[in-house]
Amino acid sequence: MARASARHILVATKEACEALKTKIEAGEDFAKCARENSQCPSGRDGGSLGEFGPGQMVKEFDTVVFSGEVGKVLGPVQTQFGYHLIEVTKRTA
């Protein structure tokens, strides 16, 4: 069964999400941005969500994690919780 490890940053608006993505793509540390900006408790751990399988996250999040490019910052991804930047750190088929 497929497994993935990912980290994310959750914010309230698409604009805030896009601004953080720009900072990270310009060299800002993802984990530091997560600690300072994420509204998810995982922010304390640099946004790390650990390892999980398909169906364990909300559909929109799941789709990106199991189809997006590994190691690239993906998003903004809108879910019922807000807007996410997602980085898939590892994925197995």
Image (cartoon, rainbow, N blue to C red):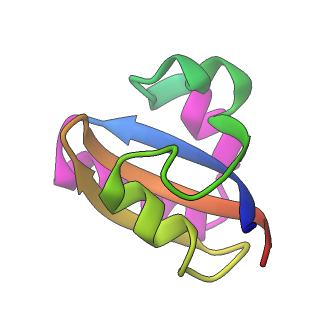
20 in magenta:
yes
Q: x, y (%) of residue 35?
A: 60, 25
Q: Nearer the viewer, residue 35 or 86?
A: 86
Determine whether, in the image, residue 20 is placed left or right of residue 50. left
Quadrant into which the C terminus falls: bottom right
40 in magenta:
no
Magenta stretch bounds: 12-35
Determine whether, in the image, residue 92 is placed left or right of residue 54. right
Vertical side of 49 occupied by 72: above or below: below
- What type of secondary structure mainly makes up the magenta span? helix
Vertical side of 87 occupied by 13: above or below: above
Residue in the image at 33% along x and 57% along y: 59
Residue 35 in view in this figure: yes
Q: Nearer the viewer, residue 76 or 24?
A: 76
Quadrant into which the N terminus falls: bottom right
Q: Nearer the viewer, residue 50 or 87?
A: 50
Residue in the image at 57% along x and 38% along y: 33
Determine whether, in the image, residue 45 is placed left or right of residue 37. right
